[in-house]
Image (cartoon, rainbow, N blue to C red):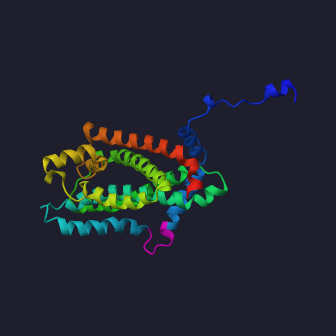
Amino acid sequence: MKETEINDLPVYDSSQQRSMALSELLDAYKYRNAIFQLTRRDVVSRYKRSFLGIIWTMLNPLGMMIILAVVFSNIFNAGPTYAAYVLSGLIVWNFFSQTTNAIVNNLNAGMGLIRKIYVPQSVFGISAILTGLVNLLFALVPLFLVMLLTGVHFTWAILFTPISILLLALFSLGIGMILATLGVFFPDVIEMYQIVLIAWMYLTPVIYPISILPETTRFLITHFNPMFAFVQIFRAVTYDGRLPLPEEILPALIFSLLSIVVGWWFFSRKAGDFAYRV
């Protein structure tokens, strides 16, 4: 080979290499059509073979709300709007628990495809979140119906709902990616997470008002439980009919950004090893 030809060859420079997190993000954008198709597949398969179809997405939280309202309304001496209070918390919690589990399941189900062709693994997590958002939109229907029936007033603050949902989705995606990554290397983590979810739900004011807790417990939950922040801002715009206060928005914003940045970074660093581990 001539010297001039050698000089024309590309030279690998590690300093010019893009970060793994950025590469994963750019690849996910390139494969946005795959994300759409995966989301479409999950939504269609969920409702196509179900006898109740979309109605089940509405009846599921509604049925749980009725049970909890009957059991706990007298215990907490709650008023007629307690059903709307519970349902607003359940919708937030169900989205988080279902999407974080779905990210793990989608990644495991997609391993057969990953071994055959290149697909950025993040598309399975993003599609799980988008599917969860579709389900959440349907779940808002019974919430608004219950609000009407129980006398909860609608205000212009409800237009802030998409912002509260976006912050929740970013937080859920980050946690799901961390969980999926750990689950690839330590499968027992997934089983342990189911136990953590149960404890986490009862440590979040989904079915009870935060005001009934002792001051010390209340301080710990309001400052160190991320899900409290997301339940709080969602309830503010739906159940309370007001815009969230800055001190309510800030924790949700911090938790969501911290979760998605750490989760995306951790996931992208380990994604190259997934096909050899699962």
Main secondary structure along the magenta-highlighted residues: loop
Residue 7: image location, x then y, percent: 79, 25
Residue 52: image location, x then y, percent: 42, 73
Q: Quadrant of the C terminus?
A: bottom right
The image quarter containing residue 206 is bottom left
Residue sticking out furthest to the left: 77
The mark total stands at 0
Residue 186 in magenta? no
Q: Which portion, as a residue range, is magenta?
A: 46-53
The image quarter containing residue 114 is bottom right
Residue sticking out furthest to the bottom: 51
Residue 68 vertical placement versus 116 (above, below)? below
Depth check: give the residue in front, 214 or 99. Answer: 214
Residue 238: image location, x then y, percent: 28, 51
Residue 133 visible? The answer is yes
Residue 264 vertical placement versus 75 (above, below)? above
Horizontal arrangement in the rendering, residue 191 relative to residue 112 (left or right):
left
Residue for point 51% across, 59% down:
106
Residue 130 visible? The answer is no
Q: Quadrant of the N terminus?
A: top right
Residue 50 in magenta? yes
Residue 21: image location, x then y, percent: 53, 40
Horizontal arrangement in the rendering, residue 84 relative to residue 262 (left or right):
left
Horizontal arrangement in the rendering, residue 106 relative to residue 66 (left or right):
right
The image quarter containing residue 26 is top right
Horizontal arrangement in the rendering, residue 263 relative to residue 238 (left or right):
right
